[in-house]
């Protein structure tokens, strides 16, 4: 019995050490992401947005009340859409996109983020225009 207890204790020590080593290999920096200033045309509303982060991790994403969110952790992308037309974002709501996304940028891995915003100007809430933003256009600030 003592032999098995000793083997179990060694296994726990080895597992703890290996998980500590694995954690040490993945260092990252948390970054807040904001969209640059943009405007909507008269009568337009934002009814969806899509965020895709390549080879890094999305750790936080704000979603407006009355929206649904689809998360695909395997490919690190998120799509959010309105459920009701009344929850669509208007010109006065664009500050929603200030620090609306937090990314863990892995050390030595380039940061690539693509965000698209679906805009409508009709009553059925279908997307009539899409505005796309790439990494270079985004405001990216380290989280203190």
Image: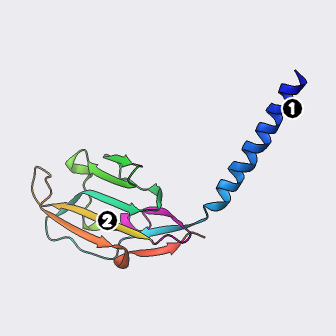
**Residue under numbered circle 1:** 6
Task: State which quarter of the image contains the N terminus.
Answer: top right
In the image: residue 33, left or right of residue 44: right
Occupied quadrant, residue 115: bottom left
Residue 94 vs residue 113, the one in the foreground: 113
Q: Which residue is rendered at x = 77% and y = 38% of the image? A: 12
Percent x, y of residue 32 = 48, 68
115 shown above or below 14: below
Inspect the magenta stretch and tell me whether residue 108 lies in it. yes
Residue 131: quadrant of the picture = bottom left
Q: Quadrant of the C terminus?
A: bottom right
State how the image is colored.
Answer: rainbow
**In the picture, residue 30 is in which quadrant?**
bottom right
Could you tell me which residue is drawn at 44 percent across and 71 percent down?
Answer: 111
**Please, is residue 106 above or below residue 47 in the view?**
below
Q: Position of residue 37 (x, y in %)?
A: 32, 77
Q: Residue at point 14% right, 69% down?
A: 42
Q: Give coordinates of residue 65: x percent, y percent.
A: 35, 48
Label 2 SS: strand
Q: Nearer the viewer, residue 72 or 40?
A: 72
Q: Looking at this rendering, what residue extends furthest in the right direction?
A: 2
Q: CA distance from mark 2 to mark 1?
A: 53 Å
Q: Nearer the viewer, mark 2 or mark 1?
A: 1
Disc 2 marks which residue? 115
**Highlighted magenta segment, given as a residue range:** 94-110
- Residue 136 in magenta? no
For the residue carrying disc 1, how many other residues have a C-alpha within 10 Å: few (<14), some (14-19), or many (20+)? Answer: few
Pointer 2 or 1: first along the chain: 1
Q: Say what secondary structure mark 1 lies in.
A: helix
Closer-to-camera residue (17/56): 17
């Amino acid at each position: 019995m003592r032999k098995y207890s000793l083997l179990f204790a060694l296994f726990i020590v080895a597992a703890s050490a290996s998980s500590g080593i694995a954690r040490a290999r993945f260092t990252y920096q948390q970054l807040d992401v904001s969209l640059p200033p943009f405007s909507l045309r008269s009568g337009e509303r934002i009814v969806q947005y899509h965020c895709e982060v390549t080879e890094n991790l999305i750790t936080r994403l704000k979603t407006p009340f009355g929206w649904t969110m689809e998360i695909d952790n395997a490919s690190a992308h998120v799509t959010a859409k309105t459920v009701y037309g009344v929850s669509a974002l208007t010109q006065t709501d664009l500050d929603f996109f200030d620090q609306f996304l937090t990314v863990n940028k892995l050390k030595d891995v380039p940061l690539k983020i693509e965000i698209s915003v679906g805009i409508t100007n009709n009553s059925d809430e279908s997307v009539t225009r899409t505005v796309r933003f790439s990494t270079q256009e985004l405001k990216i600030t380290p989280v203190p």
